[in-house]
Image (tube, rainbow, N blue to C red):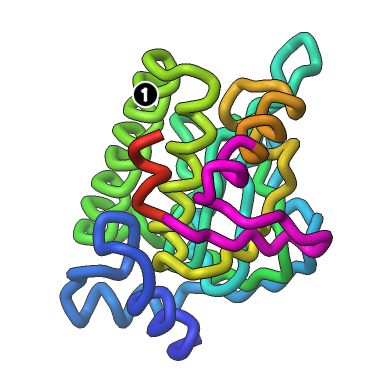
């Protein structure tokens, strides 16, 4: 478990890590209570409506948070990568499901343990507030963008989040991206085709590898 938390500590930004900036006694308590979870791609870590009794630190892999609306439509809320902390809820049950996009491992921290340690509780609150701010910013940005701008903006965010690789191994499907951006699958496909014609992207391979020929240009599209 020590190695698991150390990996979480070394990835992502301090803004999203539960263990960042903790005093030694709180970090030691966190290591003592954290459990381990490992899932293959496509498994559900927790479902919408399930008891919210723990938060999770993503050690390896990728996760999608999604919710079902009353009419049955799906909304993908966010995509998570190593170092991200998630599982916060405003009440006793989860408002969304967490589904693995590839083989993933997590540390699981019971809420009861966080609530018993003042420093951990403050840190948890700060991360939850940051998640809310990110969600609000995402909603505002989507509301002001055209469909093409939404796709380009998302790909630029993903490229940055994955450390600006020459080739992005997309853990999600194009349908997942469409459900995240509030677009039709055909719209996402057409926009990516336009970016290929502009020399910004290469062709998406059958195994989900997307060459990025000019990453900074995505921000300007």
Q: Which residues are magenta?
A: 194-214
Rendered image quadrant of residue 116:
bottom left
- The residue indicated by pointer 1 is 141
34 relative to 216 in the view: left or right: right
By secondary structure, the bulk of the magenta-drawn segment is best described as: loop
22 relative to 36 in the view: left or right: left
Q: Tell me the residue at 57%/28% (across/down).
A: 181
Picture coordinates of residue 192, whole percent (x, y): 63, 39
Nearer-the-camera pick, 89 or 75: 75
Q: Indicate yes or no whether the magenta region holds residue 203.
A: yes
Asked if residue 203 shows in the view, the reply is: yes
Q: Tell me the residue at 34%/76% (across/down).
A: 9
Q: Secondary structure at mark 1?
A: helix
211 relative to 128 in the view: left or right: right
Q: Tell me the residue at 36%/66% (across/down).
A: 12
Above or below, comparing residue 142 to residue 115 in the picture: above
Where, quadrant-wise, is the C terminus in this rendering? top left
Q: Tell me the residue at 53%/50% (across/down).
A: 199
């Amino acid at each position: 478990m020590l190695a698991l938390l150390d990996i979480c500590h070394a990835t992502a930004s301090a803004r999203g890590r539960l263990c960042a900036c903790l005093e030694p006694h709180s970090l030691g308590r966190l290591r003592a209570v954290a459990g381990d979870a490992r899932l293959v791609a496509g498994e559900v870590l927790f479902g919408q409506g399930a008891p919210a009794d723990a938060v999770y630190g993503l050690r390896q892999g990728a996760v999608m948070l999604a919710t079902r609306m009353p009419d049955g439509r799906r909304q993908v809320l966010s995509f998570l990568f190593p170092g991200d902390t998630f599982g916060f809820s405003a009440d006793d049950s989860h408002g969304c499901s967490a589904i693995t996009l590839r083989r993933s491992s997590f540390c699981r921290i019971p809420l009861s343990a966080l609530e018993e340690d003042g420093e951990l509780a403050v840190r948890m609150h700060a991360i939850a507030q940051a998640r809310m701010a990110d969600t609000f910013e995402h909603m505002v940005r989507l509301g002001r963008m055209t469909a093409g701008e939404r796709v380009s903006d998302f790909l630029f965010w993903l490229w940055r989040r994955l450390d600006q690789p020459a080739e992005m191994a997309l853990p999600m499907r194009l349908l997942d991206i469409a459900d995240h951006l509030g677009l039709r699958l055909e719209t996402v496909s057409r926009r990516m085709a336009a970016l290929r014609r502009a020399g910004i992207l290469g062709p998406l391979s059958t195994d989900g590898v997307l060459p990025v020929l000019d990453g900074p240009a995505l921000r300007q599209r």
